[in-house]
Protein backbone atom coordinates (compact mmCIF):
# COMPACT_ATOMS: atom_id res chain seq x y z
CA UNK A 1 0.00 0.00 0.00
CA UNK A 2 1.03 3.63 -0.54
CA UNK A 3 0.00 4.73 2.92
CA UNK A 4 1.36 3.64 6.26
CA UNK A 5 0.61 4.07 9.94
CA UNK A 6 -1.29 7.20 10.81
CA UNK A 7 -1.80 8.06 7.14
CA UNK A 8 -3.66 4.78 6.57
CA UNK A 9 -5.87 5.50 9.53
CA UNK A 10 -6.55 9.04 8.32
CA UNK A 11 -7.46 7.96 4.81
CA UNK A 12 -9.38 4.80 5.64
CA UNK A 13 -12.63 6.74 5.72
CA UNK A 14 -13.57 10.18 4.50
CA UNK A 15 -16.72 11.33 6.22
CA UNK A 16 -19.28 13.35 4.25
CA UNK A 17 -18.30 16.99 4.15
CA UNK A 18 -14.62 16.37 4.93
CA UNK A 19 -11.77 16.70 2.43
CA UNK A 20 -8.19 15.60 2.94
CA UNK A 21 -5.23 17.31 1.30
CA UNK A 22 -1.67 16.06 0.98
CA UNK A 23 0.78 18.27 2.85
CA UNK A 24 4.39 19.03 1.92
CA UNK A 25 5.60 16.40 4.37
CA UNK A 26 3.63 13.68 2.57
CA UNK A 27 1.03 13.39 5.34
CA UNK A 28 -2.65 14.04 4.87
CA UNK A 29 -4.31 17.01 6.50
CA UNK A 30 -7.99 17.72 6.98
CA UNK A 31 -9.21 20.56 4.82
CA UNK A 32 -12.21 22.80 5.33
CA UNK A 33 -15.65 21.20 5.50
CA UNK A 34 -17.81 21.43 2.42
CA UNK A 35 -21.39 20.56 1.54
CA UNK A 36 -22.48 16.95 1.68
CA UNK A 37 -21.40 15.08 -1.46
CA UNK A 38 -23.90 15.37 -4.27
CA UNK A 39 -25.46 18.61 -3.02
CA UNK A 40 -23.07 21.15 -4.55
CA UNK A 41 -24.11 22.75 -7.83
CA UNK A 42 -23.07 25.87 -9.70
CA UNK A 43 -25.83 27.82 -11.39
CA UNK A 44 -23.23 30.31 -12.65
CA UNK A 45 -21.16 27.84 -14.69
CA UNK A 46 -22.86 28.80 -17.95
CA UNK A 47 -22.91 32.55 -17.32
CA UNK A 48 -20.16 34.64 -18.97
CA UNK A 49 -18.17 36.79 -16.59
CA UNK A 50 -19.35 40.40 -16.67
CA UNK A 51 -16.79 42.82 -18.09
CA UNK A 52 -16.42 45.50 -15.45
CA UNK A 53 -13.60 47.47 -17.08
CA UNK A 54 -11.98 47.71 -20.52
CA UNK A 55 -8.81 45.78 -21.26
CA UNK A 56 -5.71 47.92 -20.74
CA UNK A 57 -4.52 49.09 -24.17
CA UNK A 58 -0.87 49.17 -23.08
CA UNK A 59 -0.98 45.56 -21.92
CA UNK A 60 -2.71 44.50 -25.12
CA UNK A 61 0.01 46.22 -27.16
CA UNK A 62 2.79 44.39 -25.32
CA UNK A 63 1.07 41.00 -25.64
CA UNK A 64 0.61 41.51 -29.39
CA UNK A 65 4.26 42.48 -29.75
CA UNK A 66 5.48 39.48 -27.75
CA UNK A 67 3.43 37.12 -29.89
CA UNK A 68 4.44 38.67 -33.22
CA UNK A 69 8.13 38.68 -32.38
CA UNK A 70 8.32 35.07 -31.21
CA UNK A 71 9.73 32.62 -33.74
CA UNK A 72 7.14 29.88 -33.61
CA UNK A 73 3.45 29.08 -33.41
CA UNK A 74 2.29 30.65 -30.17
CA UNK A 75 -0.99 31.59 -28.53
CA UNK A 76 -1.25 33.88 -25.51
CA UNK A 77 -4.27 34.83 -23.41
CA UNK A 78 -4.66 36.92 -20.27
CA UNK A 79 -7.97 37.37 -18.47
CA UNK A 80 -8.68 39.63 -15.52
CA UNK A 81 -10.72 37.46 -13.18
CA UNK A 82 -11.97 40.56 -11.36
CA UNK A 83 -12.74 42.87 -14.29
CA UNK A 84 -13.67 40.24 -16.88
CA UNK A 85 -11.62 41.52 -19.84
CA UNK A 86 -9.52 39.19 -21.98
CA UNK A 87 -6.47 40.01 -24.09
CA UNK A 88 -5.11 37.47 -26.53
CA UNK A 89 -2.70 36.86 -29.36
CA UNK A 90 -3.82 33.99 -31.61
CA UNK A 91 -5.82 32.97 -28.58
CA UNK A 92 -8.72 31.21 -30.30
CA UNK A 93 -6.60 28.69 -32.16
CA UNK A 94 -6.24 25.21 -30.65
CA UNK A 95 -2.74 24.21 -29.57
CA UNK A 96 -1.51 20.87 -28.19
CA UNK A 97 -2.08 20.81 -24.43
CA UNK A 98 0.05 17.84 -23.51
CA UNK A 99 0.14 17.71 -19.69
CA UNK A 100 -1.95 20.85 -19.32
CA UNK A 101 -4.85 18.43 -19.87
CA UNK A 102 -4.14 16.89 -16.45
CA UNK A 103 -5.96 19.94 -15.12
CA UNK A 104 -9.27 18.70 -16.57
CA UNK A 105 -8.75 15.22 -15.12
CA UNK A 106 -8.20 16.77 -11.70
CA UNK A 107 -11.35 18.87 -12.00
CA UNK A 108 -13.40 15.89 -13.14
CA UNK A 109 -12.16 13.85 -10.17
CA UNK A 110 -12.92 16.59 -7.66
CA UNK A 111 -16.34 17.10 -9.24
CA UNK A 112 -16.98 13.38 -8.71
CA UNK A 113 -16.00 13.86 -5.06
CA UNK A 114 -18.39 16.82 -4.80
CA UNK A 115 -21.19 14.67 -6.23
CA UNK A 116 -20.48 11.75 -3.91
CA UNK A 117 -19.38 9.38 -6.68
CA UNK A 118 -15.96 8.70 -5.15
CA UNK A 119 -13.91 9.92 -2.20
CA UNK A 120 -10.34 11.12 -2.07
CA UNK A 121 -9.53 7.94 -0.16
CA UNK A 122 -10.89 5.64 -2.88
CA UNK A 123 -8.19 2.97 -3.43
CA UNK A 124 -6.67 2.44 -6.87
CA UNK A 125 -4.35 -0.39 -7.84
CA UNK A 126 -1.85 0.20 -10.63
CA UNK A 127 -0.56 -2.91 -12.38
CA UNK A 128 2.22 -3.25 -14.98
CA UNK A 129 -0.37 -3.25 -17.75
CA UNK A 130 -1.50 0.22 -16.58
CA UNK A 131 1.88 1.91 -17.07
CA UNK A 132 2.14 4.64 -19.67
CA UNK A 133 5.30 6.33 -20.94
CA UNK A 134 7.62 9.31 -20.60
CA UNK A 135 7.47 10.88 -17.14
CA UNK A 136 6.01 8.37 -14.66
CA UNK A 137 7.97 8.28 -11.38
CA UNK A 138 5.31 6.05 -9.85
CA UNK A 139 6.34 3.25 -12.23
CA UNK A 140 9.25 2.42 -9.91
CA UNK A 141 6.74 1.39 -7.23
CA UNK A 142 4.68 -0.89 -9.46
CA UNK A 143 5.63 -4.51 -8.85
CA UNK A 144 4.21 -7.55 -10.71
CA UNK A 145 1.42 -7.79 -8.14
CA UNK A 146 0.63 -4.10 -8.53
CA UNK A 147 0.79 -0.99 -6.36
CA UNK A 148 -2.21 0.27 -4.39
CA UNK A 149 -2.66 3.86 -3.34
CA UNK A 150 -5.48 6.43 -3.20
CA UNK A 151 -7.11 8.77 -5.69
CA UNK A 152 -5.78 11.66 -3.59
CA UNK A 153 -2.19 10.48 -3.86
CA UNK A 154 -2.47 9.94 -7.62
CA UNK A 155 -4.05 13.36 -8.08
CA UNK A 156 -1.23 14.99 -6.14
CA UNK A 157 1.44 13.18 -8.16
CA UNK A 158 -0.25 14.08 -11.45
CA UNK A 159 -0.61 17.77 -10.64
CA UNK A 160 2.71 18.44 -8.89
CA UNK A 161 5.04 15.98 -10.68
CA UNK A 162 3.05 15.62 -13.93
CA UNK A 163 3.18 11.82 -13.55
CA UNK A 164 1.51 10.34 -16.64
CA UNK A 165 0.60 6.97 -15.14
CA UNK A 166 -0.84 8.61 -12.02
CA UNK A 167 -2.96 10.88 -14.20
CA UNK A 168 -4.27 8.11 -16.45
CA UNK A 169 -5.13 6.10 -13.34
CA UNK A 170 -7.22 8.98 -11.97
CA UNK A 171 -8.86 9.34 -15.36
CA UNK A 172 -9.87 5.67 -15.40
CA UNK A 173 -11.14 5.91 -11.81
CA UNK A 174 -13.62 8.64 -12.79
CA UNK A 175 -14.84 6.98 -15.99
CA UNK A 176 -12.24 7.60 -18.70
CA UNK A 177 -11.99 10.29 -21.38
CA UNK A 178 -15.75 10.50 -21.85
CA UNK A 179 -16.19 11.49 -18.20
CA UNK A 180 -13.71 14.34 -18.60
CA UNK A 181 -15.34 15.47 -21.82
CA UNK A 182 -18.72 15.35 -20.11
CA UNK A 183 -17.50 17.50 -17.23
CA UNK A 184 -16.17 20.15 -19.61
CA UNK A 185 -19.49 20.15 -21.47
CA UNK A 186 -21.50 20.53 -18.25
CA UNK A 187 -19.35 23.50 -17.30
CA UNK A 188 -19.80 25.08 -20.76
CA UNK A 189 -16.07 25.19 -21.50
CA UNK A 190 -15.54 26.03 -25.17
CA UNK A 191 -12.33 25.58 -27.11
CA UNK A 192 -10.93 22.74 -24.98
CA UNK A 193 -10.65 19.16 -26.18
CA UNK A 194 -9.67 16.16 -24.12
CA UNK A 195 -7.77 13.39 -25.87
CA UNK A 196 -7.72 9.59 -25.60
CA UNK A 197 -5.23 9.27 -22.74
CA UNK A 198 -1.46 9.36 -22.63
CA UNK A 199 -0.64 6.09 -24.38
CA UNK A 200 -2.75 6.56 -27.51
CA UNK A 201 -1.97 10.27 -27.73
CA UNK A 202 1.81 9.89 -27.57
CA UNK A 203 2.08 6.81 -29.75
CA UNK A 204 -0.09 8.43 -32.42
CA UNK A 205 1.93 11.63 -32.31
CA UNK A 206 5.08 9.60 -32.88
CA UNK A 207 3.58 7.55 -35.74
CA UNK A 208 3.31 4.32 -33.75
CA UNK A 209 0.43 1.99 -32.91
CA UNK A 210 0.25 1.48 -29.16
CA UNK A 211 1.39 -1.81 -27.71
CA UNK A 212 1.72 -2.18 -23.94
CA UNK A 213 5.29 -3.44 -24.35
CA UNK A 214 6.16 0.14 -25.33
CA UNK A 215 5.61 1.17 -21.70
CA UNK A 216 8.53 -0.84 -20.39
CA UNK A 217 12.13 0.35 -20.25
CA UNK A 218 13.27 2.20 -23.38
CA UNK A 219 10.98 0.30 -25.74
CA UNK A 220 8.99 3.34 -26.87
CA UNK A 221 12.12 5.34 -27.65
CA UNK A 222 13.64 2.45 -29.60
CA UNK A 223 10.47 1.89 -31.63
CA UNK A 224 10.13 5.60 -32.37
CA UNK A 225 13.76 5.91 -33.42
CA UNK A 226 13.36 2.96 -35.80
CA UNK A 227 10.64 4.76 -37.79
CA UNK A 228 11.60 6.47 -41.06
CA UNK A 229 12.03 10.21 -40.52
CA UNK A 230 9.39 10.95 -43.15
CA UNK A 231 6.84 8.85 -41.24
CA UNK A 232 7.60 10.64 -38.00
CA UNK A 233 7.28 14.05 -39.65
CA UNK A 234 3.95 13.10 -41.22
CA UNK A 235 2.58 11.95 -37.88
CA UNK A 236 3.80 15.05 -36.07
CA UNK A 237 2.44 17.35 -38.78
CA UNK A 238 -0.96 15.65 -38.54
CA UNK A 239 -0.99 16.01 -34.77
CA UNK A 240 -0.08 19.69 -34.85
CA UNK A 241 -2.65 20.44 -37.56
CA UNK A 242 -5.53 19.00 -35.53
CA UNK A 243 -4.43 17.96 -32.03
CA UNK A 244 -6.92 15.62 -30.32
CA UNK A 245 -5.87 17.27 -27.05
CA UNK A 246 -6.03 20.75 -28.55
CA UNK A 247 -7.19 23.77 -26.57
CA UNK A 248 -7.31 27.49 -27.17
CA UNK A 249 -5.58 29.85 -24.75
CA UNK A 250 -8.83 31.83 -24.50
CA UNK A 251 -10.76 28.67 -23.62
CA UNK A 252 -8.24 27.77 -20.94
CA UNK A 253 -8.14 31.18 -19.25
CA UNK A 254 -11.94 31.24 -19.29
CA UNK A 255 -12.00 27.89 -17.48
CA UNK A 256 -9.34 29.01 -15.00
CA UNK A 257 -11.29 32.17 -14.25
CA UNK A 258 -14.42 30.08 -13.64
CA UNK A 259 -12.39 27.86 -11.32
CA UNK A 260 -11.16 30.84 -9.32
CA UNK A 261 -14.69 32.30 -9.12
CA UNK A 262 -16.02 29.00 -7.74
CA UNK A 263 -18.03 28.06 -10.82
CA UNK A 264 -16.29 24.74 -11.58
CA UNK A 265 -16.11 22.98 -8.21
CA UNK A 266 -17.29 23.26 -4.61
CA UNK A 267 -15.42 25.77 -2.42
CA UNK A 268 -13.44 23.01 -0.68
CA UNK A 269 -12.50 21.26 -3.92
CA UNK A 270 -11.55 24.59 -5.48
CA UNK A 271 -9.25 25.26 -2.53
CA UNK A 272 -7.64 21.81 -2.79
CA UNK A 273 -7.00 22.16 -6.51
CA UNK A 274 -5.57 25.67 -6.37
CA UNK A 275 -3.32 24.88 -3.40
CA UNK A 276 -2.07 21.74 -5.16
CA UNK A 277 -1.40 23.69 -8.37
CA UNK A 278 0.68 26.13 -6.35
CA UNK A 279 2.92 23.22 -5.29
CA UNK A 280 3.73 22.17 -8.88
CA UNK A 281 7.38 21.25 -9.27
CA UNK A 282 7.39 21.57 -13.07
CA UNK A 283 8.21 24.66 -15.11
CA UNK A 284 9.81 26.96 -12.52
CA UNK A 285 11.37 29.04 -15.31
CA UNK A 286 8.25 29.33 -17.45
CA UNK A 287 5.52 31.82 -16.48
CA UNK A 288 6.43 31.36 -12.83
CA UNK A 289 9.91 32.68 -13.49
CA UNK A 290 8.46 36.13 -14.21
CA UNK A 291 6.02 36.25 -11.29
CA UNK A 292 7.29 38.89 -8.82
CA UNK A 293 7.88 38.28 -5.14
CA UNK A 294 4.71 38.74 -3.16
CA UNK A 295 2.51 37.36 -5.93
CA UNK A 296 0.98 33.87 -5.83
CA UNK A 297 0.99 31.53 -8.84
CA UNK A 298 -0.93 28.25 -9.23
CA UNK A 299 -0.33 26.47 -12.52
CA UNK A 300 0.02 23.46 -14.79
CA UNK A 301 2.62 22.95 -17.49
CA UNK A 302 2.76 20.76 -20.56
CA UNK A 303 5.61 19.58 -22.78
CA UNK A 304 5.26 17.71 -26.07
CA UNK A 305 7.53 15.57 -28.17
CA UNK A 306 10.55 16.82 -30.07
CA UNK A 307 11.62 16.00 -33.59
CA UNK A 308 14.68 18.06 -34.41
CA UNK A 309 14.70 20.89 -35.05
CA UNK A 310 11.10 21.20 -33.80
CA UNK A 311 9.83 21.24 -30.23
CA UNK A 312 6.10 21.03 -29.63
CA UNK A 313 3.49 21.64 -26.95
CA UNK A 314 5.60 23.81 -24.65
CA UNK A 315 2.98 25.33 -22.34
CA UNK A 316 2.20 26.95 -19.03
CA UNK A 317 -1.24 27.98 -17.79
CA UNK A 318 -2.27 29.26 -14.39
CA UNK A 319 -3.63 31.93 -12.09
CA UNK A 320 -1.52 34.86 -10.86
CA UNK A 321 -2.75 36.61 -7.71
CA UNK A 322 -1.44 40.01 -6.69
CA UNK A 323 -0.69 41.03 -3.09
CA UNK A 324 -3.97 43.00 -3.10
CA UNK A 325 -5.91 39.85 -4.06
CA UNK A 326 -6.59 40.70 -7.71
CA UNK A 327 -6.20 37.69 -9.98
CA UNK A 328 -5.36 37.02 -13.62
CA UNK A 329 -5.67 33.81 -15.61
CA UNK A 330 -2.74 33.28 -18.01
CA UNK A 331 -2.04 30.82 -20.80
CA UNK A 332 1.04 30.72 -23.01
CA UNK A 333 0.99 27.82 -25.47
CA UNK A 334 3.84 27.21 -27.91
CA UNK A 335 2.52 24.76 -30.46
CA UNK A 336 5.74 24.40 -32.43
CA UNK A 337 9.08 26.20 -32.44
CA UNK A 338 12.75 25.79 -33.24
CA UNK A 339 14.05 28.30 -30.68
CA UNK A 340 15.96 27.33 -27.56
CA UNK A 341 14.35 26.60 -24.20
CA UNK A 342 15.75 29.83 -22.66
CA UNK A 343 14.07 31.80 -25.46
CA UNK A 344 10.78 30.09 -24.68
CA UNK A 345 11.23 30.86 -21.00
CA UNK A 346 11.91 34.50 -21.87
CA UNK A 347 8.59 34.81 -23.71
CA UNK A 348 6.61 33.25 -20.87
CA UNK A 349 8.35 35.32 -18.22
CA UNK A 350 7.77 38.49 -20.24
CA UNK A 351 4.02 37.81 -20.17
CA UNK A 352 3.78 37.37 -16.41
CA UNK A 353 6.23 40.19 -15.73
CA UNK A 354 4.21 42.54 -17.93
CA UNK A 355 0.90 41.59 -16.33
CA UNK A 356 2.34 42.26 -12.89
CA UNK A 357 4.09 45.44 -13.96
CA UNK A 358 0.92 46.94 -15.41
CA UNK A 359 -1.34 45.82 -12.57
CA UNK A 360 -3.18 48.71 -10.96
CA UNK A 361 -4.36 47.92 -7.42
CA UNK A 362 -7.96 49.01 -6.99
CA UNK A 363 -10.39 49.07 -4.11
CA UNK A 364 -13.07 46.42 -4.53
CA UNK A 365 -16.34 45.83 -2.78
CA UNK A 366 -16.79 42.94 -0.38
CA UNK A 367 -19.38 41.57 -2.81
CA UNK A 368 -16.86 41.40 -5.66
CA UNK A 369 -14.26 39.89 -3.35
CA UNK A 370 -16.63 37.04 -2.61
CA UNK A 371 -17.62 36.53 -6.25
CA UNK A 372 -14.02 36.28 -7.44
CA UNK A 373 -12.98 34.02 -4.59
CA UNK A 374 -10.56 36.56 -3.15
CA UNK A 375 -11.89 35.84 0.32
CA UNK A 376 -11.30 32.11 -0.18
CA UNK A 377 -7.96 30.25 -0.23
Image (spheres, helix red, strand yellow):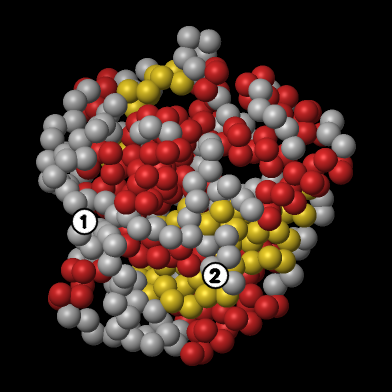
- Provide the residue designation for mark 2: 91
- Residue 349 in view (yes/no): no
- Residue 114 in view (yes/no): yes
- Provide the residue designation for mark 1: 42
The residue most toward the top is: 145
Element class at badge 1: loop
* Quarter containing the N terminus: top left
Asked if the residue under mark 2 is in contact with the one under mark 1, i.e. CB atoms within 8 Å, the reply is no
Q: Residues within 10 Å of mark 2 (few under 14, many from 20)?
A: many
Residue 181 lies in quadrant: top left
Query: Mark 1 or mark 2: which comes first in sequence?
Result: 1
Q: Residue at x 21, y 40 (%)?
A: 115
Where does the image place residue 163, in percent across and percent down from the top left?
51, 37
**Alpha-carbon span between mark 1 and mark 2:** 27 Å
Using the image as rendered, state which of residue 245 and residue 290 is in the foreground. Answer: 245
Q: Is residue 24 above or below residue 260?
A: above
Q: Residue at x 64, y 67 (%)?
A: 74
Image position of 236 (left or right of 356): right
Using the image as rendered, state which of residue 222 and residue 50 is in the foreground. Answer: 50
Image position of 145 (left or right of 374): right
Element class at badge 2: loop
Residue 329 lies in quadrant: bottom left
Where does the image place residue 296, in percent across and percent down from the top left?
38, 64
Where does the image place residue 118, in percent across and percent down from the top left?
26, 31
Residue 174: which disc? none
Using the image as rendered, state which of residue 8 and residue 215 is in the foreground. Answer: 215
Image position of 354 (left or right of 40): right
Image position of 277 (left or right of 336): left
Q: Residue at x 48, y 55 (%)?
A: 192
Amino acid sequence: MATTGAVMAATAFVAPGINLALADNGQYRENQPTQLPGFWTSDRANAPAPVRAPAPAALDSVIQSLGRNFNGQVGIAVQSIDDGWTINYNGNRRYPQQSVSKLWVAMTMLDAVDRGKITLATPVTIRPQDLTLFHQPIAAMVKPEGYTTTVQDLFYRAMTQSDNTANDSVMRAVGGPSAVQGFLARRFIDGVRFGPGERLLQSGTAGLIWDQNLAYGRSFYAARAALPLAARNRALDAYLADPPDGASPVGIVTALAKLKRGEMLSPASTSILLSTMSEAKTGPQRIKGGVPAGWYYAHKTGTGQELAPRSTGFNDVGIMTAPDGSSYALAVMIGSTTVSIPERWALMQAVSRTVAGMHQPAARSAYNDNITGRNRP
